[in-house]
């Protein structure tokens, strides 16, 4: 991720050159405007000309003049190629259940534009322009999210709207596609040769869902350094375990940078200075922050490298190779989702380990025998439950995360009459990563709530570090200090929103500079 550019600050994305995860999130989540560069347009039109030429020559080309999957030996006449493309959209729109979120759909459409814009797919520019208008005008196709092995079905639901079929969200309402198009001053299109295949095949949804999940996981991981440091501080932990000399003898980059983050956050903390020798050694959930957070962050950064390669790839099949005497179509399997799927399975495990440690730190905060504070951080425990039950919530969420950390990509159920006798299942890896990212944010929010409440029992003559104080001050604007039981649900949501939006990171970095 680019530490100097945040997705929420990007207002326009021009497709044509390399882009990163921030641009994808900017369009998917923050409604950045999408434009095409001249080089993008030229690449698309060049590959389309080749497709049209080859169709006139009646070449046999997979998915263009043949059927799909096990039907690839069935030759389709050039007079029926348009019907073939419509049929693939109608027949493949079979995913079921609850719809993908708006940002997931926007991210997938954006990835389709980026995929085809590499110049190796052969779609018409007019079709891509229609999808660009969907993004810029706020037409969000209805796409059920359950039942994909890596591509095809959710993307087919999205493509239905191009031809005036299916449903779409427009201005907050779910309405028939034709009505949505009319309200946005658009007309449905007729798909041409190869376009139906292009619009449903590829790693577009896998990459979009994975990128959104990973973006949130990486922000949560950085926020976990902040919240972990604040827990260490209020639990009177020793900063000695974060000494750079200790980190240098085990030179994992992310371990060392995590320790440095914690030292910088607590550099001016009177609490930390006063209690540096309070214990010889803290519990693992405190002294092992550099090691576990560092390992998790390394895994997330490895996933980021793979995701950004995929974002800038052509994952179509077949590809239109424009070079040589007359170019050629090359069939293979670039739509395979193994690269992203395996990384997202690993990212799920990394995020779950961050949550595992957060829950243990929170348990130390609310357990009076471990923290030295009143049980459950309430002045009159017994009459009041205080923060007893949020830790139960953490336990339930963490159990979900452990279940979701089972890798999706180790499974493979053959499809398509044995033609697709191996399936990567990357879609499910990215889909469950979306759930895990959200649960991690809630678990961290509950730990932060406990940190906030614990400070009322700290010696008022000892001030926290300036970074910690900035976070505590921000929380105090909306979350009251508990003196007796109160309705906690809205306050947990408030803290989760602060984490999800990156506001806590912004606060801390405004005081101590960029965290690593």
Image (cartoon, rainbow, N blue to C red):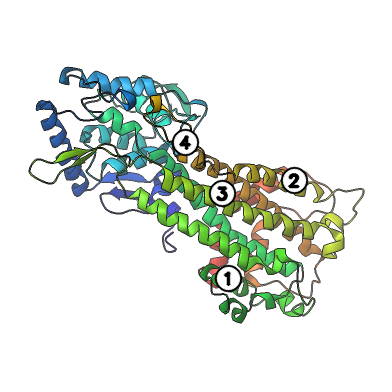
Mark 3 or mark 1: name the one nearer the start of the chain: 1
Q: CA distance from mark 1 to mark 4?
A: 35 Å
- Circle 1 residue: 261
Mark 2 or mark 4: whose residue is earlier in sequence: 4
Q: In the rendered view, tell whether residue 311 sits above or below residue 415.
A: below
Residue 348 is tagged as: 3
Q: Real-space Cα distance between discs 4 and 3? A: 22 Å
| In the displayed structure image, the side of residue 40 where residue 32 appears, left or right | right
Tell me the number on the disc at residue 102.
4
Label 2 element class: loop
Q: Could you say whether the residue bearing mark 1 is in a helix, strand or loop?
A: helix
Query: In the rendered structure, are the residues bearing label 3 and label 2 in contact, judged by CB atoms less than 8 Å apart?
Result: no
Q: Of the residues under marks 1 and 4, which one precedes in the sequence?
A: 4
Name the spot of residue 163 as percent of width and height, x first.
31, 22
Q: Are marks 1 and 4 in contact (CB under 8 Å)?
A: no
Q: Disc 2 marks which residue?
A: 488
State whether residue 165 appears in this view: no
Q: Residues within 10 Å of mark 1 (few under 14, many from 20)?
A: many
* Res. 333 mark: none
- Crowd class of label 3 (few under 14; some 14 to 19; many from 20; radius 10 Å): many
Q: Earlier in the sequence, mark 1 or mark 2?
A: 1
User: What's the distance in space between the residues labelled 3 and 2, CA to CA?
Assistant: 28 Å
What kind of element bears circle 3? helix
Outermost residue toward the bottom?
A: 245
Q: Locate residue 472, reporting x and y percent.
A: 68, 62
Along the polypeptide, which appears first: circle 3 or circle 2? 3
């Amino acid at each position: 991720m680019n530490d100097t550019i945040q997705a929420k600050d990007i207002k326009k994305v021009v497709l044509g050159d390399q882009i990163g995860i921030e641009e994808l999130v900017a369009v998917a989540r923050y409604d950045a405007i999408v434009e095409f560069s001249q080089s993008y347009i030229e690449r698309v039109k060049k590959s389309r000309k080749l497709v049209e030429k080859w169709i006139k020559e009646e070449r046999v080309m997979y998915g263009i003049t043949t059927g799909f999957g096990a039907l690839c030996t069935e030759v389709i006449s050039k007079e029926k190629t348009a019907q073939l493309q419509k049929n693939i959209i109608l027949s493949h729109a079979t995913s079921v259940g609850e719809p993908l979120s708006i940002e997931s759909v926007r991210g997938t459409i954006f990835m389709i534009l980026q995929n085809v814009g590499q110049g190796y797919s052969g779609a018409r520019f007019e079709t891509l322009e229609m999808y660009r208008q969907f993004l810029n005008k706020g037409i969000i196709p209805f796409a059920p999210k359950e039942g994909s092995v890596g591509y095809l079905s959710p993307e087919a639901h999205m493509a239905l709207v191009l031809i005036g079929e299916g449903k779409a969200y427009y201005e907050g309402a779910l309405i028939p596609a034709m009505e949505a198009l009319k309200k946005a001053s658009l007309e449905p299109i007729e798909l041409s040769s190869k376009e139906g295949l292009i619009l449903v095949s590829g790693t577009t949804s896998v990459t979009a869902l994975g990128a959104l999940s990973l973006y949130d996981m990486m922000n949560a991981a950085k926020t976990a350094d902040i919240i972990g440091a604040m827990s260490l501080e209020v639990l009177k932990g020793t900063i000695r375990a974060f000494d750079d000399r200790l980190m240098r003898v085990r030179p994992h980059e992310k371990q060392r940078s995590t320790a440095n983050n914690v030292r910088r956050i607590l550099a001016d903390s009177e609490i930390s200075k006063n209690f540096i020798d309070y214990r010889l050694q803290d519990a693992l959930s405190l002294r092992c922050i550099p090691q576990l957070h560092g390992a998790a962050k390394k895994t997330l950064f490895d996933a980021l490298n793979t995701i950004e390669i995929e974002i800038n790839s052509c994952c179509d099949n077949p590809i239109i190779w424009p070079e040589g005497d007359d170019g050629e179509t090359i069939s293979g399997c670039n739509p395979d989702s193994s690269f992203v799927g395996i990384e997202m399975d690993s990212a799920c495990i990394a995020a779950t380990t961050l949550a595992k440690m957060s829950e243990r730190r929170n348990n130390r905060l609310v357990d009076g025998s471990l923290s030295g504070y009143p049980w459950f951080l309430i002045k009159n425990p017994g009459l009041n439950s205080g923060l007893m039950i949020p830790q139960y919530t953490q336990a339930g969420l963490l159990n979900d995360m452990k279940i979701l950390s089972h890798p999706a990509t180790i499974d493979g159920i053959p499809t398509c009459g044995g033609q697709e006798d191996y399936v990567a299942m990357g879609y499910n890896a990215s889909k469950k990563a979306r759930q895990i990212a959200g649960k991690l944010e809630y678990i961290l929010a509950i730990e932060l709530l406990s940190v906030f409440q614990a400070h009322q029992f700290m010696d008022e003559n000892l001030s926290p570090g300036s970074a910690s104080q900035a976070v505590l001050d921000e929380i105090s604007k909306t979350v009251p200090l508990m003196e007796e039981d109160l309705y906690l649900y809205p306050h947990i949501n408030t803290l989760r929103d602060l984490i999800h939006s990156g506001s806590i990171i912004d606060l801390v970095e405004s005081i101590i500079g960029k965290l690593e």
